[in-house]
Amino acid sequence: MGDLTNSDYYAKNQGNDVSSNHEGGFGVSVMELRDLMELRGSEAVVKIQEDYGDMDGLCQRLKTSPTEGLTGDDLDKRKEVFGENLIPPKKPKTFLQLVWEALQDVTLIILEVAALISLGLSFYQPPGGDSGESCGTAAAGAEDEGEAEAGWIEGAAILLSVVCVVLVTAFNDWSKEKQFRGLQSRIEQEQKFQVVRGAQVIQLPVADIVVGDIAQIKYGRKLTLKLTCFSLPSRGGPQKNKFHFGPEKTREGPNPILTTKQDGAAAMEMQPLKSAEGGETEEKEKKKANVSKKEKSVLQGKLTKLAVQIGKAGLVMSAITVIILVLYFAVDNFVLQKRPWLTECTPIYVQYFVKFFIIGVTVLVVAVPEGLPLAVTISLAYSVKKMMKDNNLVRHLDACETMGNATAICSDKTGTLTTNRMTAVACYVGDVHYKEIPDPGALTAKSLDILVNAISLNSAYTTKILPATKEGGLPMQVGNKTECGLLGLVLDLKRDYQPIRNQIPEEKLYKVYTFNSARKSMSTVIKLSDGSFRMYSKGASEIVLKKCTKILNQEGEPRVFRPRDKDEMMKKVIEPMACDGLRTICVAYRDFPANPEPLWDDENDILNELTAVCVVGIEDPVRPEVPDAIIRCQRAGITVRMVTGDNINTARAIAIKCGIIHPGEDFLCIDGKEFNRRIRNEKGEVEQERMDKVWPKLRVLARSSPTDKHTLVKGIIDSCLTDQRQVVAVTGDGTNDGPALKKADVGFAMGIAGTDVAKEASDIILTDDNFSSIVKAVMWGRNVYDSISKFLQFQLTVNVVAVIVAFTGACITQDSPLKAVQMLWVNLIMDTFASLALATEPPTEALLMRKPYGRNKPLISSTMTKNILGHGIYQLVIIFSLLFVGEQIFDIDSGRHAPLHSPPSEHYTIIFNTFVLMQLFNEINARKIHGERNVFDGIFRNPIFCSIVFGTFAIQIVIVQFGGKPFSCTPLDLEKWGWCTFLGLGELVWGQVIATIPNTKLRFLRGAGQLTKKNEMPGDEDMNEDNEEIDHAERELRRGQVLWFRGLNRIQTQIRVVNAFRSSLYEGLEKPDSRPSIHNFMTHPEFRIEDSTPHIPLIDDTDLEEDPSLRKTLQPQAGSQPQSPNKNNNAVDSGINLTIDTTSKSAASSSPASPLHSLETSL
């Protein structure tokens, strides 16, 4: 049960001899238990028998009782002697380690090196007094002695700002790690386990389990132990659980387990029983699925691609900047002024080159968006924290953002859409259908006794109905909710289940067949006083009734139950109940003789020839908030599908109540059997093509197994039917839901009803098991995406402007108007502060008013591109005006062509100040990315944003007024500050001007934002406006009508082409490769497209010219059809095969009744 390596505990206790532990009052030592745990299977059984006699002997030595557990008096002593059940957490990285990691950034390293060289060279004084003259341009700045000495400041300032950037990055990483640890510890604290103490079953945090505890284990539970387990003996049938070391057989179902000490840590996952739909292959598949990691989240993929592209562009720009500066300097000095290269001048020249290099690197630093990952992290961390309050416990950070792109949600019914509070409201007993629970006097004593015994004994003993905690409240339902509904029926019939259970305690049950998704029933065998056996069964009514051959009549006597009676009962009892949204459960029993004892392993034989006792209709009301949540999902472009194990009629009734389906709509409600028939071929393999005909219209999948759920999720994800790949979210609570939860893009596990295996496989845990919490997750996910887009819009504007200013300024004036340290400050505003400000915007309901963006939509929309270019143009015009005519406007000295180490000029300070203030006001513009006019909307709901904007403004004042030489700034007077602020405020006005320009006027922007994909259907936005999922083929048919009208003057040609086509049709057509075409799913009632023929693009050439991606999709397959002389009519060129008879593979178009014929004649 885990690796048996030496732990710290044993290192400490190695010296303890056995007796020291025996003195602790226990008859067994840590070392003995450890040795015992090194044995496996039968060896362990032999060892227990040799050393302790049997499991009871071991329990006595550990001072525990197999049935009553520990008394709880000596828990601290046990922890002292045997150690605690705690696995020490992995040590977090120290702050220094994180600083070291942040220093590994390549651009920062380049800057550090350049700054050090600059620092070193600034202290170098060329020998000889007159060398300054002979070195020409290079020495012009060294006139002032004091200024020459201040040359070191720039290098030092760059190093200081690098230190700042590194510390900020390290601090962000540290806080992210801390947050993540907090999240992990919360998940661990919530993990509780059932143990028996003082004959009571209680729930404990896993860390409180001690050696000697009797733990109750069901499959699907995860028990993390530094202790170890033995299953305890129990009566009856063969052991099916995979984790026992006990010497005797134990029954299926909840297993009492003795915990002992074990070295190291063992994470025990209780595997599901091998069910009919499982088997070896599925286990192998599961292993494969667990190994392969989920693909990158949508946003991560897009951001990585974008960052690489921007980085490349920045690298090219910075390289060109350096080359131009160096060439200009060399040409000016050595070619035009014909100066020789003097040895003593070399350090001064090198100093110039280093300055050029630093300018180049700062261009690169500003261009590379290292703030992107930071913005994503901050946004996700903020969202995850807030989502906790909305009952979403996020286990994987990226799930939060993926949820914003979800296009489909496959939800369970019980507990998620319904309240999971089951109440029996109708029943059929003794040939009478009671619409409400009958009076006990209406039933015969015999029927009543059998019914009460069947329900009380054939249910988990952990399932109970406890008195209400508040006065006037409803009784508390503990355990399986369906069983609670049945126990409620017993109480309604004025009987009590507890005395019956006390009479036959759990350990006296002879054999239990637990409920699983294959059986859809549960059965319990008891031994009667005369030695014979009675088996009670309960389960899905249509499944249990099929196995019944008798039924109790009004007198409580069994009578023959014929197939005809079964059909009548289905129609008159079960279907009406199901149509009212009731879950129908059938209770039955069977008697077996004492001799010969039946073969309990032969399930098919045992679970047969039953006698039906009654059918109960259990109501599980829809949660009041669910219908509204589903409407919001549908409005947001998300299709909700219900996947349930319930009867199809019950499922349909609940789906209508929830609003998943609306009468009169075109949708599919099918059960698991029909679903498999439709999607599998003759060999039983799932075919994607068949799946694509089912899932778009599927809304309810009833009587489904976990395998069906997994198949459906996989089929939707793998489908190429839509131009965007579907992003699927799935809810699950059972152990068998694990594979589906893992396969889905986002898996939601139930926090209350979910098993540990389901939680482990999920991405988000719903702490209240409520569907409306999923809608909150969608909202937060979209908010993350929008926050990142806001940040991108802001950052790219700064990037574009800063890079162009530095580049052109350097090329024209041989010096960047924005100095290295100033660039780093801009970078800090841009990266860290802006990501904090824009990534913490709270979500609004408006986020649910639009369709999902989809995986292929570019990260930068056309509106964003318009904003980036618009604001970029404004800022460049202002800065270049200030750069080239600023000195005349403000009547100050020009800062252009300033020599090396010259004092900061007022001219360049104004440029720097105006640039920063424009960014500050543009940050407010960046709050809106969909072209909204009111950029201040809800600004005070985000205190972080306000404080960052004001804080940055305050720091900017300090930098300009007191920054001096390090920041290359000189103090400005109030008038100049007024002008700088006025130009900054102009950003807000300009933003309104940009908002008035419609995107349609800017056709060229369409391609501008498409940084992240090769091709996209231009008509995508228009298509998304349709609320219903209109099939692509239908859309093309509408366009097709236009085609037929245009074709009126070409009827003759058409008929000729059709005739030519008919003659060639019977020649062997090769089956074209199946490609993802928009016509794969053609559901028009009249037309059906056969797989073996080329697809029909019902679309005109003119449309193809407008839509290049469609042209690609619709190109006729080479070699499949002769070209027609008619070049204009694309529909007929591509070859048509319209068939009415779905079985026929030949062309029906030749017959007079064919649609083509009627079209010809009508035209």
Image (spheres, helix red, strand yellow):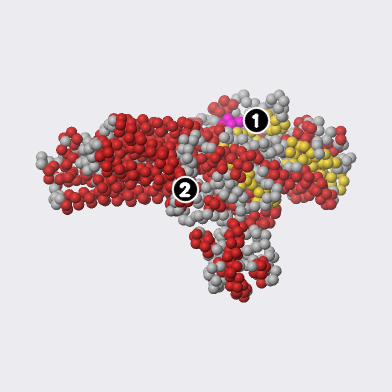
| Type of amino acid at the residue the image marks with label 2 | Pro
Q: Residues within 10 Å of mark 1 (few under 14, many from 20)?
A: some
Vertical side of 383 occupied by 1114: above or below? below
Circle on res. 202? 1
Q: Could you say which quadrant of the image residue 69 lies in?
A: top right
Residue 706, x across and y down, in percent: 65, 48
Q: Earlier in the sequence, mark 1 or mark 2?
A: 1
Q: Is residue 331 among the parts visible in the rendering?
A: yes
Q: Is residue 1124 left or right of residue 353?
A: right
Residue 924, x across and y down, in percent: 43, 37
Residue 1102 vs residue 628, the one in the foreground: 1102
Q: Is residue 205 magenta?
A: yes
Residue 316, x across and y down, in percent: 33, 51
Q: Is residue 379 left or right of residue 597?
A: left
Circles 1 and 2 in contact, beta carbons < 8 Å: no
Cα distance between the residues tagged 1 and 2: 65 Å
Q: Is residue 512 magenta?
A: no
Residue 568, x across and y down, in percent: 83, 49
Residue 153 vs residue 834, the one in the foreground: 834
Q: Name the residue: 33% across, 47% down.
A: 804
Q: Name the residue: 36% across, 30% down.
A: 954
| Type of amino acid at the residue the image marks with label 1 | Ile
Q: Name the residue: 12% across, 43% down.
A: 133
What secondary structure is marked by label 2? Answer: loop
Which marked residue is nearer to the observer: mark 1 or mark 2? 2
Residue farthest to the right, as pictured: 555
The span picked out in magenta is 201-210
**Label 2, on which residue?**
998
Q: Name the residue: 13% across, 48% down.
A: 342
Vertical side of 261 occupied by 866: above or below? below
Residue 864 vs residue 982, the one in the foreground: 982
